[in-house]
Image (cartoon, rainbow, N blue to C red):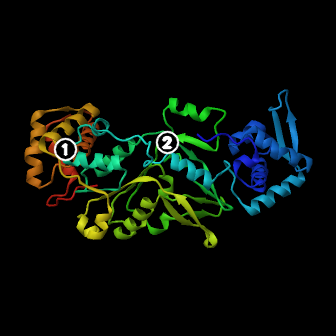
Amino acid sequence: MPRQAKTVRDTGLEPRFVTDLVLKTIEATGKAPLPLLAGKLRLSISVLREVLNPLIAEQQVEVAWCGESDIDMQYQLTAIGQRGALDALARCRYVGPAPVTLASYRAVVERQALRHADAERITPAQLAGALGEDGLTPAAREVLGAALYARRSLLLFGPSGGGKTTLARKLGRLLPGPIAVPYALMAGRQVIRLYDPAVHVAPPPVARQHEERRSCDARWTVCQRPLVHVGAELGRDMLDLRYDAEEGVYHAPPHLQANNGMLVFDDVGRQRIAAAELLNRFIGPLDAGCDQLSLQGGQAELVPFDAAVVFATNLAPGGVFDDAALRRVGYKAEIDAWSSHAYRALLRRQCRMRRIEAEDAAVDHLVDRLHPQSGRPLLACYPGELLDRVADFAGFAGTEPRLTIAAVEQAWRSMFIAGTTEAAK
């Protein structure tokens, strides 16, 4: 974690910006205790005092209450301070944790980079432990391991329902952590909100001890390496900064949030951006380690880009990318149908997880008759979907779920339309 800023100068921010942020925060809070201000702005007490003392001298802020401790103080705005806060809001509506400078962010991303010479590398044992009994061929596992080891881009292709998305998430959890992520960035005079609790997940308590040290900069938080997943909803507009006029802040695009982690592009070829354009948009910045993002008014900022990038598609790769584009992808792994043995093992694991007793005859009936007769491959998505329906029918009937031939037949008929080979989603 970066060291705590003890002065306004240490923050790297303009004094006027920090003063405005303090005024806006007090205005939004009313009577603001000093520890509350420190928590909201993620600034040290010494920095806040450096800002508050001149504001008190200028009669913009006054002490509303004072306890026995020099920290036990509450502040409020005067009439002059109220006008100052309104002026500050007119300049920038952002209220929240104090941002860090882009220069500081670049330095930390570089230290935490997946391609850093000292970065921990994936081992065969770690990969095997994460994937478990997933039905992958040894050749496919070796491709995945090499891609993670080399930190190169990866294309997962194969039929829909084969488990590509689940596999990508497992790979993301293999990335070593934890890392430091700032709540917000300062780009020129603009604020970019970077932290997202849905993406930047807190690590186990032991790892968070680093964040709680008083010497650490509270503008940063400790999290697991992020795993950002975007699907068919992805459009060209989502790949740049998005300005929120109400909050007065830019929201970071997915690839900026994914820094020092994994970025998964799912359903490639079905998105609102052409697959070749998507690939070209990221392979270059990935190789360069930086990307250029645009602010309002035409201003552009260079931001770091360090992520393990995974593309996933259920379309034929040759129909999605041309040969030149495919050559730019580091590794390609086909995620195909499972073997009969692996599929049976998956079905039984799913039964144990759901506490559903399975009859051997029912398992044989599913694998040896229903799948061949319908022409449906043994895909990873089917066991869970089928068992969910077995449980639904049993629950409706008021009985305990049990995997019998009759239950399998009933669930199977409810999943598919006769005469089709497309799984119901």
Q: Nearer the viewer, mark 2 or mark 1?
A: 1
Dot 2 lies on which element?
loop
Location of residue 123 with respect to 206 vertically, above or below: below
Q: Is residue 243 visible?
A: yes
Foreground residue among 23 and 387:
23
Q: Which residue is mark 1?
A: 138
User: Is 263 left or right of 222, judged from the image as shown?
Assistant: left
Quadrant in which the C terminus is drawn? bottom left
Amino acid carrying mark 2 in the image: Val
Foreground residue among 15 and 351:
15
| Residue 122, percent from left and from top | 34, 41
Quadrant in which the N terminus is drawn? top right
Q: Which residue is mark 2?
A: 201
The residue lying furthest to the top in this view is 68
Residue appearing at x 19%, y 44% in the figure? 138
Q: Is residue 137 visible?
A: no
Quarter of the view holding residue 87: bottom right
| Residue 415, percent from left and from top | 22, 51
Quarter of the view holding residue 251: bottom right
Foreground residue among 313 and 244:
313
| Residue 68, percent from left and from top | 85, 26
Residue appearing at x 42%, y 60% in the figure? 287
Location of residue 315 with respect to 224 vertically, above or below: below
Residue appearing at x 74%, y 55% in the figure? 14
| Residue 33, percent from left and from top | 78, 38
Dot 1 lies on which element?
helix
